[in-house]
Image (cartoon, rainbow, N blue to C red):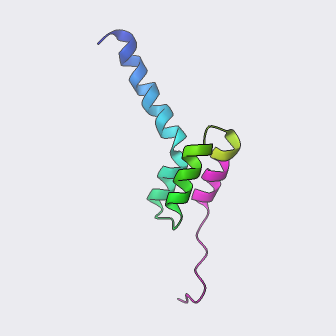
Amino acid sequence: MGLPAIFFFPFFGFGFVMYFLPSIIALARSKRDTLAIFLLNLFLGWSVIGWIVALVWAAKSDVPAAGYYR
């Protein structure tokens, strides 16, 4: 394992985490639409707009379902 490989793996891992950050946030917040957010992130995350939409969707709080009362 050469010196370039030692520097490559942390940056690759950081990029991977940053790309899937909306999916990670949705999973951590137990969102109802985690799968949909993941799919949006997977297929449209390469575009900046798709990534931002997925991030906002993951960060937004869920609206209670109809008929749900506390």
Q: Residue at x 54, y 45 (%)?
A: 42
Which of the two residues, 41 or 57, is positioned nearer the viewer here? Answer: 41
Kindly give the residue lying farthest to the left in the view shown.
1
Q: Name the spot of residue 44 as percent of width and height, x first.
A: 62, 44
Q: Name the spot of residue 16 as percent of width and height, x first.
A: 47, 36
Kindly give the residue lying farthest to the top in the view shown.
2
Q: Residue at x 39, y 24 (%)?
A: 9
Q: Quadrant of residue 7?
A: top left
Q: Residue at x 58, y 44 (%)?
A: 43
Q: Quadrant of the N terminus?
A: top left
Residue 4 vs residue 68: left or right?
left
* Residue 59 shown in magenta: yes
Query: Magenta residues, as a range?
Result: 52-70
Q: Residue at x 61, y 85 (%)?
A: 66
* Residue 64 shown in magenta: yes
Q: Name the spot of residue 60 as percent of width and height, x first.
A: 62, 62
Count of picture labels = 0
Residue 8 vs residue 20: left or right?
left
Q: Quadrant of residue 27?
A: bottom left
Looking at the image, residue 8 lies above or below residue 50 = above
Q: Name the spot of residue 34 as percent of width and height, x first.
A: 50, 60
